[in-house]
Amino acid sequence: MARASRQDAWEFFGAELKRRRELAGMTQGELGRRVFVSGGYIGQFEQAIRKPQLDVAQRIDEALQTDGFFERLCRKLIDKSRYADYFAAAAELEGLATEICEFAPTMVPGLLQTPEYARAVTLAMNPFASDEYIEEKVIARMERAHILQNPVKPLYWVILHENALRVPVGGHGVAAAQLDSVATLVRRRRVLLQVLPYAAGAYALPTGTLKLMNFDDAPPTAYTEAVYSGNLLDDPAVVKRAQSAYDRLRAAALSPEASLAMLESAAEDFRRCASTT
């Protein structure tokens, strides 16, 4: 499904949600309370600004007695997404965020990946996939990264564990070029980078990645990801705990200046290894 037609489908989802909610005689706030989200979120679903997760669509069906209509439509749209179903909603929110704070414990995150690095990561995760499948995933990742071409937003703060600087993903040449690309974004002041060094020892989030997203007109959201699974979290108490963990990572990480120096040193190490092989 092309991007435009998928957005049209989400707009249809929202229009139907509004129509059926009003037929049921519910306000946005009333429906929100029944499905455990805010009334403002219901309004954003209806305007196709935000896309509900599958469990929310299921609860909407229960509240409005719509016999699985919204669940089926949500499943179809998720299946047509270019992203894994557990990540599709988070990918949509990236494009709306005014600020993104991310922690990556093992590799350079998707928003910063070069095509060659993204291809190596995708192939490692899908060793028997066709070339067409691999390229589709790489293109989708590069399209996500376009948000960093905007000189104003989102503000992007990333903390990389030193692991991400030391593993030669795609080979030493690809890894060097990847770190050079990140360094360029840092020097252009488009990305604020910190590195959590091995010397920091144990840290606040020992498993999985964390992405915090802030918006102009909506509450903040956290997204965590582990093995073939992800969780989009918008409960204020949970998001607050995630923000607190991220703040502790910031405190333990190197300064931006020292982080850039370590990044560039790691890139040079990769280049030396590439030249001798």
Image (cartoon, rainbow, N blue to C red):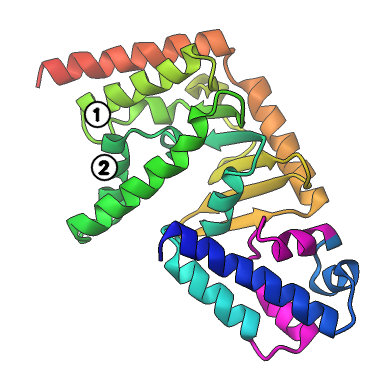
Badge 2, how many Cα within 10 Å: few under 14, some, many 20+? some
Residue at 75 percent across and 46 percent down: it is 239
Which residue is identified by label 1?
174
Residue at 67 percent across and 47 percent down: it is 222
* Residue 247 visible to the viewer: yes
Of 119 and 251, the residue lying toward us: 119
Q: Give the vertical position of 195 relative to 139 (above or below).
A: above
Residue at 26 percent across and 53 percent down: it is 134
Of 197 and 123, the residue lying toward us: 123
Q: Are marks 1 and 2 in contact (CB under 8 Å)?
A: yes
User: Where is residue 169 drawn, in percent x and y?
Assistant: 28, 35
Instruction: Report the predominant secondary structure element of the magenta stretch.
Output: helix
At label 1, the amino acid type is Val
> Could you tell whether 45 is left or right of 128 in the image?
right
Of 209 and 211, the residue lying toward us: 211
Q: Which residues are magenta?
A: 40-68
Q: Give the vertical position of 44 relative to 20 (above or below).
A: above
User: Where is residue 73 drawn, in percent x and y?
Assistant: 56, 78
Q: Quadrant of the C terminus?
A: top left
* Residue 85 visible to the viewer: no
Badge 1, how many Cα within 10 Å: few under 14, some, many 20+? many
- Residue farthest to the left, as pictured: 277
Which residue is identified by label 2?
120
What SS does tag 1 mark?
helix
> Could you tell whether 130 is left or right of 72 in the image?
left
- Is residue 61 covered in magenta? yes
Rounded to the nearest angstrom, the CA distance separating label 1 from label 2 is 9 Å
Q: Give the vertical position of 270 relative to 54 (above or below).
A: above
